[in-house]
Image (cartoon, helix red, strand yellow):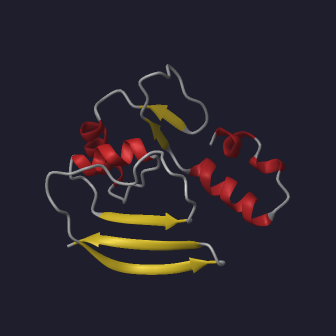
Amino acid sequence: MLAWETDGEGRSDPNQLEFARIWKALPKVVFSSTLETVQGNARLATGGVAEELATLKEQSGKDLSVGGAGLASNLVELDLIDEYRLFVSPVVLGGGTRYFPALDSRTTLELAETRTFGARVVYLRYRRR
């Protein structure tokens, strides 16, 4: 996603320009076991996922968003997600990263919002019940 930080201004589509502007302004925390440095408006996490999340929540007092199936799976397993915002774009792959990890207990969700984008993508927002 570094491209949005570095060359977003060179885009001509107004929607892409707006996304680049918003993306650059957002502070980001990168969780990685292989990276030693990150670029742009980001910092490399030094603590565990639960500790970093608690610190971020305390500092900002705002909602936090998570991208990436691996990191999201860790948060699901730690029971740290209050709301799920899913964009479903149907493609049959036959394999790949699971959407949700296998859990020992059931999590009940309540549908809070839906939107459809074009003829392919559906946005679903669920709250924990």
Q: Is residue 96 left or right of residue 118?
A: left
Q: Is residue 113 left or right of residue 77?
A: right
In percent of the image, x 73 and y 65: which residue is there? Answer: 15
Q: Nearer the viewer, residue 68 or 2?
A: 68
In percent of the image, x 70 and y 41: which residue is there? Answer: 3
Q: Is residue 111 above or below residue 40?
A: below
Q: Is residue 78 above or below residue 62?
A: above
Residue 11 horizontal/vertical position (percent) = 82, 53
Q: Nearer the viewer, residue 128 or 65?
A: 128
Residue 64 horizontal/vertical position (percent) = 38, 55
Q: Nearer the viewer, residue 33 or 65?
A: 33
In percent of the image, x 52 and y 80: which residue is there? Answer: 115
Residue 71 horizontal/vertical position (percent) = 38, 42
In percent of the image, x 34 and y 72: which residue is there? Answer: 126
* Quadrant in the picture for the C terminus: bottom left
Q: Residue lying at the far left in this picture: please name it.
A: 105
Q: Nearer the viewer, residue 78 or 60?
A: 78
Q: Is residue 22 left or right of residue 47?
A: right
How many numbered marks appear?
A: 0
* Quadrant in the picture for the N terminus: top right
